[in-house]
Image (cartoon, rainbow, N blue to C red):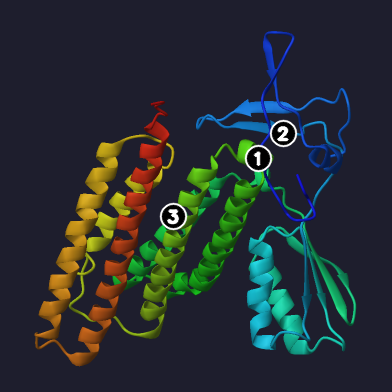
Amino acid sequence: MNSESGAKSEVRKIQLTGGSTYIVSLPKSWVTQHGLGARDEVRIEWRPSGTLRVIADASSVVKQREVRINCNEIPDHMIFDHLVASYLSGAHRIIISSNMEFSRFQRKIFRDFVKSTRGLEITNDHNREIEMISLLNPSEMPLFSSINRMYLLISRQIRDFSEVLMGGDPDILEESSELENEVDALRLLLERQAGQILESASIEDSLGTSRWEAAELCKLVRTLERMGDHSFALCDLAKSYKAPNLINMDSLPISIIPIWHNSIKLLVSNLKNRNFSEIHDAKFKLITAQKDLIQYEEALRASDVDISDALFLDRVSESLRRICAYSINMAEILMNIQTHRDSIEVYT
């Protein structure tokens, strides 16, 4: 193995020793990089795919990813994006530097970024260099618990929206922005964890999720985040405009909300369960609801409803329709995961 060239694999011959034992030698560079030596033990796992994985459990070497950002090389409006990219890359340490003192605007970006993540803290703060360290152990935040938290936040926003439409206290929507920020922060955390699972066998084991499943869960998390965007949009709409008098929970588009609540609850419960019939049922109801909303919007545009009321109802219908569409995507992702869990390797 040539570590300088970045090679990650090589071909080695199986050898027979003692007449009954097959062995494969380990590359010297791999052994030295992990601080191992003769008589040290390694763990060998037989993966479901038939692949053998060699894990350096006895290694004393601790590897941490570090990202350096030079503010002189990127425009201020892109600093936040570079910080997010560093976080998602799994960086344990982010070092931000500049040839001159950081401006107030730049420092606000740094603070906003820390608030938008989980587990990051500023440990060193100087005029021209700031260091951020991740204090969160990936295995301390179970994936499914974080996904369930995202679902609860989104569900709460839609419940608050429904309550205000039915005459509830509008003040309950004041927290909608905070809930939206928490959904976004959880999305970043989960994508970071998924990336770490793809890179690290130990994190994969500690979180109990395979690499294949982590990739699918990453899609699911983005789907939930988009639902969160529309649940926040609904709350913002209810805060900014007066709801039409003709609106009620028994008529479209609001009558779709209980259908969505019941369907998404079924889907979330199947993150761990293996009940295809529940996923099928939820998807069918969501598809039906989506079609009903499309027909409702077409009829609304041809109606004589007051223009301001029509615009309000149309925006509500569109957001609910998109939330249903993303929930349908979630059902399909869950079917992918369940099918992969139930599949078996067949040798031919």
- Residue drawn at point x = 20 percent, y = 91 percent: 307
Q: Which of labels 3 and 2 is toward the front?
A: 2
| 2 or 1: tag closer to the N-terminus | 2
User: Sequence order check: which comes first, mark 3 or mark 2?
Assistant: 2
Q: Nearer the viewer, residue 177 or 123?
A: 123
Q: Position of residue 251 (x, y in %)?
A: 16, 67
State how far apart marks 3 and 2 are (Cα). Answer: 29 Å
Q: Residues within 10 Å of mark 3 (few under 14, many from 20)?
A: many
**Mark 1: which secondary structure?**
helix
Tag count: 3
> Which residue is label 1 attached to?
201
In the structure shown, which secondary structural element does the residue marked by tag 3 occupy?
Answer: helix
Q: Amino acid at mark 1?
A: Ala
Q: CA distance from mark 1 to mark 3?
A: 22 Å
Q: Is residue 267 left or right of residue 56?
A: left
- Return the residue at label 2: 55
Residue 143, image x, y percentages: 55, 46
Residue 225, percent from left and from top: 46, 64
Q: Quadrant of the N terminus?
A: top right
Q: From this view, report whether residue 249 is shown above or below residue 334.
A: below
Q: What amino acid is at disc 3?
A: Leu
The residue most toward the bottom is 307
Identified at 57% across, 36% down, the residue is 208
Q: Quadrant of the C terminus?
A: top left
Is disc 2 in contact with disc 1, using a CB cutoff of under 8 Å?
yes
Which type of secondary structure does the marked residue at label 2 adopt?
Answer: strand
Q: Is the C-beta separation of discs 1 and 3 under 8 Å?
A: no
Q: Give the residue number, with chain letter if any, for mark 3.
A: 220
Which of the 4 image quarters holds residue 260? bottom left
